[in-house]
Image: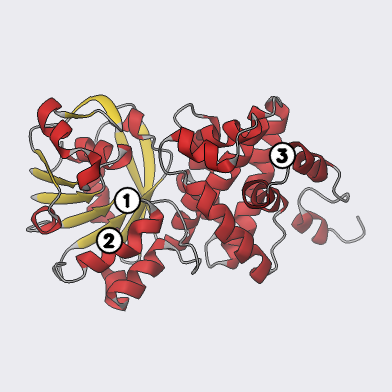
Amino acid sequence: MEKVCILGAGSWGTAQAVLLSRNCKQISLWAKPEEGLDAFMATGENKKYLPGVTIPENVSVTTDLNEAVEHSSVVVLAVPSQAIREILAKLKPILHKDMYIVNTAKGLELNTGMRMSQVAEDVLGSAIKNRYAVLSGPSHAEEVAVELPTAVTVAAYKREIAFDIQDTYMSSNFRVYTNPDVAGVELGGSLKNIVALSTGIAMGLGYGDNTQATIITRGLNEMIKIAGKMGADPRTLYGLSGLGDLVVTCGSKHSRNRQAGMLIGQGKTPEEALEETGMIVEGYYTTKVVHELARSLNVEMPIVKSCYYVLYEGRPPEEEVELLMTRRKKHEIEEIVENLQGW
């Protein structure tokens, strides 16, 4: 690729700029004025979001959206999911018909419950499906930026786009797999944040490894159930964008969702935890969306329900854990029992 534009100069946007600079001649990193362009220029690094990582010489940083997008072959969305609609509306008049859109945000839109591909189609029209891809997986910016081995998934409606984006991102330390299941890849990256928040809350309460393993495993079960109802192939949820991202987000010191959950478990209010975390906690918003979707789709999601009550209704976390542990008895995997007559 001659030029790639990345919209969003947070930790993940900056890490992608560093990563893509090895394969692309020119990278344009668009930052909001408040993200500190002067500091970028003076120090050659993103001290606020990704300190210690030098910005390569072929990465230019700008606050001018037109300048960032001009002559780009690929536009990467690395802004929070709740800002995607706004940024796409600004992009609409300046997008070239041959430009690819690659979404790397992991969330669902408040009020509409839309996945990011659906938001893109709503704003830019149905034709954008032929130029859209989503990149997702266990990929903490702090590790990608320093070339630690990482693997992710890219999904697109058109195979050729998936292959092009695979080639654009692929390196000896960053492996990219392709998948046609856009819904599954988007949902895996969004839903796992709720489970990570819940795991963090349990850690903050002082519960042990057994509790965390239970939340992760049963949380994955909830993810698979609702993703299937929302048009995803359940098998995708066992891949990098589902289980892979779930493992790293629940277990990593870099996980802002886990960190926010830990603070809540330790007694902070959700608002205090979000402020102290210092970065966008996507799981906070996704919990509200998925709780509403679960009710409308008639999907039983007890972990999501408990997380919602803690975040939005002020329920004590320890009480929600007790309620989860004392629910009615049931089979672990209902489908297995249903297929066995007389068991």
Q: Amino acid at mark 2?
A: Ile
- Relative image position of residue 279 (x, y in whole percent): 40, 39
**Contact (Cβ within 8 Å) of mark 2 with mark 1:** yes
Mark 1 or 3 closer to N-term? 1
Q: Nearer the viewer, residue 80 or 273?
A: 273
N-terminal-most mark, 2 or 1: 1
Residue drawn at (57%, 40%), measured in percent from left and top? 196
Is the residue marked by circle 3 packed among few (<14), some (14-19), or many (20+) residues within 10 Å? many
Residue 235 versus residue 45: which sits nearer the camera? Answer: 45
Question: Counting other residues with Cα less than 10 Å from the Cα at mark 1, is it few (<14), some (14-19), or many (20 or more)?
Answer: many
Q: Secondary structure at mark 1?
A: loop
Indicate the amino acid at tag 3: Pro
**CA distance for labels 2 and 3:** 36 Å
When the figure is inspected, residue 300 is found, relative to residue 141, above or below; the finding is below
Which residue position is annotated with label 3? Answer: 317
- The residue under the point 48% across, 58% down is 184
Residue at 49% across / 34% down in the picture?
248
The residue labelled by disc 1 is: 79
What is the three-letter code of the residue carrying label 1?
Val
x and y, in percent, of residue 280 in the image: 42, 44
